[in-house]
Image (spheres, grey):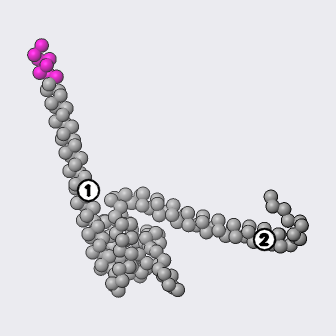
Amino acid sequence: SNWAIFSILTAVVSENMAQVTEDHEKELETEQAEIKRKDVRSKLNKMFDKLDVDKSDTLNEDEFMAVWADEMTEQEFQELTGWTREDAPELFEALGEQEDGPLGIQSVTRAAFIDGLDVGGDQLTMRSIMRVEKRLAELDSNLRVRLGRRFEKQHSQISLRSPSQVSFR
């Protein structure tokens, strides 16, 4: 009957309109997230400029820790990144790189500062990654020490034997 067809057509049109509306809302959310991300990156870039006192395009530890010297800067940093004063040493270590040269001073580059802190509200993931990286570095160091000791022990055992007593098992 006509009413059944009309009812089916109404349902199809309504479903299509709902899908179009949902797609449009997702598109708007994506656009707003991108605008927010650009705004955060711009603010982090300006903050880096403010902190980079010697204009070296890197932040040494003192320059980096200056984020927490000024209450307004600290508040802005926390709002932009979710990181707090308590996270500072871990954060500097994770973002920093050893500079070439005899002193091997650790510093944070502009790119590391902006890319490392622009996590799009996903601080937990960034923090988890930093902890895993730190733990991997500790494990690597421990493994190198243990392997070094084992190698030295085996080397000393081989040195004590005469060449005819050495077996390669």
Which residue corresponds to the image point at 35% horizontal and 74% vertical from the top-left? 110
Q: Is residue 8 left or right of residue 143?
A: left
Marks 1 & 2, CB-CB < 8 Å contact: no
Q: Residue 128: percent from the left, percent from the top?
A: 46, 59
Q: Secondary structure at mark 2?
A: helix
Name the image quarter holding residue 19: top left
Closer to the N terminus: mark 1 or mark 2?
A: 1
**Residue at screen point 38% across, 79% down:** 58
Q: Which residues are magenta?
A: 1-8
Residue 62's place in the image compared with 121, above or below, is below
Residue 122, visible in the rendered structure: yes
Which residue carries the number 2 mark? 155
User: Disc 1 to disc 2, how far (Cα)?
Assistant: 60 Å
Residue drawn where x is 46% and y is 60% of the image: 129
Query: Image point 42% across, 57% down: which residue?
Result: 125
- Point out which mark residue 33 bears: 1
Label 2 sits on what residue type? His
